[in-house]
Amino acid sequence: MRRAVKKLRTMLNSVSRPVGLTNPPRQFFMGCRDLSFWLRSARADQRLAQLQREHSTQKAFDLLYERTPDPWGYLVPHYRYQRLKYEKMLAMLPARPYGGALDVGCGLGVFTRRLAPYVHQAVGAELSGVAVGQARVLSAGCPNLRFEQAGVEEIGICGAERVDLLILADVLYYLCPLSDEKLKSIVAAVERRLQPGGILLLANHFFFGMDAQSRQVRHIHDAFRWAGSLRLLQERWHPFFLVATLQKTL
């Protein structure tokens, strides 16, 4: 296992790294309190899966947010893992001006708010109307942000304008099933929404392929890497997620 992990990290770190939008954090990736974060996240995923067996995906997410306003604990300040993860994601973005951004599957808009100082305008798109309402309240102090109800499969219609930055973080493996045809259509929609030279920030939970979600992640990332108009800038593995930045070339 150690040899495989070392090989993976060497491969990922060999990709050329541009200057980041922020400096990457140097702290350890998590603290003891984050053990409860993992348990909370696992329970949220379990509850969501149960709801999806009885309802549509949109209804399942709505019910989850109605019953637990912060299902995955992203707003809990003493969970450092998610905060450091977002800092590492920001550090992956090339240091440049960003006019318009689209954060797909934004949930309560936590990462969208982290983007606010670095973009002219940003749209957070989320399937759950309940989560969208909460995100709007939480983001009242950020006049350059707005939130719309739209799922990942509606990337092409949540706002007509092209964007300089598009974020897909921890969302695609919630599409059940995620067929190759569906994945290809999402890749094509991302290509259409990005301006020439625009950046895709792609991040997904990745725990050595030991769980069902992780086993999909390598396939998801490769689908974007092999897209005709997207060029990989960098891809890095951190405990326990994989993050990549790609640039539209055409």
Image (cartoon, rainbow, N blue to C red):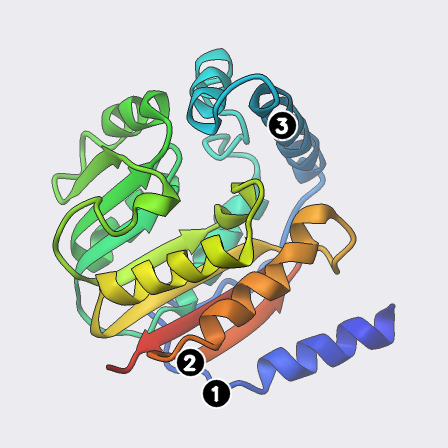
Q: Position of residue 112 (x, y in %)?
A: 31, 45
Q: Is residue 14 left or right of residue 121?
A: right
Q: Are marks 2 and 1 in contact (CB under 8 Å)?
A: yes
Dot 1 amino acid type: Ser
Dot 2 amino acid type: Leu
Crowding at label 1, few (<14), some or many (≥20) Cα neighbours within 10 Å?
A: few
Label 2 or label 1, whichever comes before in sequence order: 1
Q: Nearer the viewer, residue 118 or 12?
A: 12
Crowding at label 3, few (<14), some or many (≥20) Cα neighbours within 10 Å?
A: some
- Does residue 198 sit above or below 108 in this rendering? below
Label 1 or label 3, whichever comes before in sequence order: 1
Residue bearing the label numbered 1: 16
Helix, strand or loop under label 2: strand
Helix, strand or loop under label 3: helix
**How many badges with numbers are in the image?**
3
| Residue 28 visible from this viewpoint | no
Residue bearing the label numbered 2: 233
Q: Nearer the viewer, residue 48 or 23?
A: 48
Q: Nearer the viewer, residue 203 or 149?
A: 149
Q: Are marks 1 and 3 in contact (CB under 8 Å)?
A: no
Residue bearing the label numbered 3: 49
Q: What is the quadrant of the C terminus in the image?
A: bottom left
Q: CA distance from mark 1 to mark 3?
A: 38 Å
Q: Position of residue 116 (x, y in %)?
A: 23, 49
Q: In percent of the image, x 75 and y 60: which residue is there? A: 208
Q: In percent of the image, x 77 and y 71: which residue is there? A: 5
Q: Position of residue 187 (x, y in %)?
A: 39, 63
Instruction: Residue lying at the far top in this picture: please name it.
Output: 67
Q: Nearer the viewer, mark 3 or mark 2?
A: 3
Q: Nearer the viewer, mark 2 or mark 1?
A: 2
Label 3 or label 2, whichever comes before in sequence order: 3
Q: Position of residue 106 (x, y in %)?
A: 37, 41
